Image: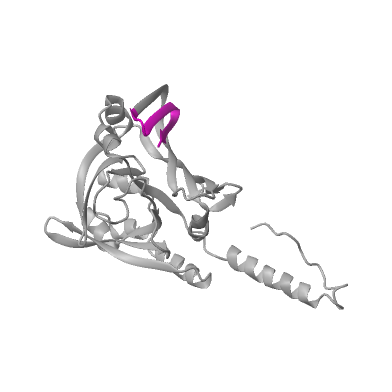
Amino acid sequence: MEKQSSVKSYDGCRLGCSIDTRLVIVFMILAHSILAQPKLLSDCNTIFICIDSVSYRQLFANSYIKDTLFFCREATTNTLNDSYTGKYAIGKAANLEFFKPSEQDKIGNHLNDFGIEFKTRTLGELQTLQQIAQQQKVPIDTNTTQLTEEDIVLVWYKTLKVKRTKTNFELSIIEYQKVYLKYLGFTDAEIASPMTFDYFNQKLSHGRKYPRQFNKIRAITLQINKTEMPYFKQFCVLNQMKQTRNSFYSPDLSIDYVVVDTPLPTKIKKIKVELINPQAKRNIRVSNNLSFNINQKNCEIVF
């Protein structure tokens, strides 16, 4: 945080300025508190979005998308309390999950529902974020997700979200749990060390070279309903992202937004992903509502 002013002395504030002086002191205390917070790094590892049925059906029909851009698959995930099927674009350091509308009334099943998920790099960071939220009086929800795998139940990850009323999107920070990481083959030393999602995927692939071009998520463009801005801002600040005029950003990601003062829902307009190698410029139209624009090391997914 940049200092807006500095106080060198209290000269000239002895009469009629005691309230201003107290405000300055309070501001300095708050600024020091923010600066004293531990610097925590998280990776944007997953975006899920519900697209129309036609776009879903044709999503991986293009050979360039499935054979060059993304490692693609359709799969079902089973947790202790839920089961869901989607199409997955798996990258070197991030994933995209696409779902089609469903009659079941929950987040991710309605057209344009979406979620942006960050992953902590070190065990214990989620607890630190929870403490920071309590200090800042940010209402949060936490929960634990358990994975059912090969007839066993594993504690998969813990989640932190800013508490809010029902809406069509969610922002979350997750932290894989030790029992799950040990099940995957990580050593105690690896688990105790900072772990990027890139490293996590390399470990699971046993060091094999990633066979496609999707490296990581670089930018997200949102259309945000004005009523959702407080929730969006609270989450980004808690996630230790910095703000410019119409963007929150971290070293690897920017979330750009346009605020609308109408009943229009909050939705993802564009996702920009970074590619590993430069690609020839091309435009792929999957449907009337979905297209991929590729140029050099950038791929923009436009909804």
25 sits left or right of 55 in the view: right
Most frequent secondary structure within the magenta stretch: strand
Of the pair 43 and 133, the residue shown nearer to us: 133
Is 178 on the left-hand or right-hand side of 268? left
The magenta stretch spans which residues?
286-303
- Which residue is situated farthest in the left direction here? 151
Please name whichever residue, 296 or 166, is drawn nearer the observer in this view of the structure: 166
Left or right relative to 223: residue 176: left
Q: Quadrant of the C terminus?
A: top left
The residue most toward the front is 263
Magenta-drawn stretch contains 291: yes
- Coloring basis for residues: one colour
Residue 63, placed above or below residue 111: above
x and y percentages locating residue 229 in the rendered image: 52, 56
Front residue of 261 and 108: 261
Q: Where is 139 relative to 266, above or below?
A: below
| Residue 129, horizontal then vertical, whole percent | 45, 65
Magenta-colored stretch includes residue 108: no
The answer, for residue 213, to whether it is visible in the render is yes
Q: Quadrant of the N terminus?
A: bottom right
Residue 115: give x, y in percent of width and height. 37, 51
Q: Position of residue 209 (x, y in %)?
A: 30, 35
Q: Is residue 180 left or right of residue 218?
A: left
Which residue: 24% across, 51% down? 103
Q: Place residue 83 in its image quadrant.
A: bottom left
Residue at point 25% right, 59% down? Answer: 180
In this rendering, does residue 236 appear at all? no
Residue in view at x 67 percent, y 57 percent: 2
Q: How many marks?
A: 0
